[in-house]
Amino acid sequence: MSAPILKPFFVTIAYTAVVMAESESDARAVADAQAHEICREEAADITTGSEVTRIADLKAHGWCGEELAYGGDGQTKLKDVLSALESLPTRDTKTIDMFAGASA
């Protein structure tokens, strides 16, 4: 059996914390300075978004394709992942099991 094919997906990770500050803008600065500690101590609200299938999907979120995705091999840029995925044959999920169990 072959290894599963990994595909890129957008996810949103949000943390809620309380910081002590003099103003709203100062609160942002304090949160930015304490971000690593907040991430370690607070539970994340993680929402799975859409699959990334094109460079345009990345650009809509401020990415360009030169980045590495979390959970990948740590070396392959997103633009190269998308290029490799485009070359794979498309499987029709509506008829994928149509001939399962049929003998030749």
Image: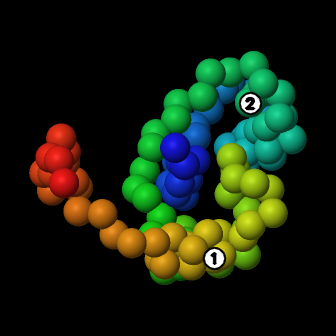
Residue at point 65%, 75% (across, down): 80
Q: Secondary structure at mark 2?
A: helix
The reply to whether residue 60 is in sight is no
Residue at point 83%, 28% (across, down): 37
Q: Which residue is label 2 attached to?
A: 39
Say whether disc 1 or disc 2 marks the residue closer to the N-terminus: 2
Give x and y (percent) for residue 25.
72, 49
Q: Which residue is label 1 attached to?
A: 79
Give x and y (percent) for residue 41.
75, 19
Who is closer to the viewer here, 94 or 22? Answer: 94
Tell me how far mark 1 sits from mark 2, CA to CA: 29 Å
Foreground: disc 1 or disc 2? 1
Residue type at the position of mark 1: Lys
Q: Quadrant for residue 66, please give it.
A: bottom right
Q: Name the image quarter holding the C terminus.
A: bottom left
Give x and y (percent) for residue 57.
47, 72
Who is closer to the viewer here, 69 or 33? Answer: 69
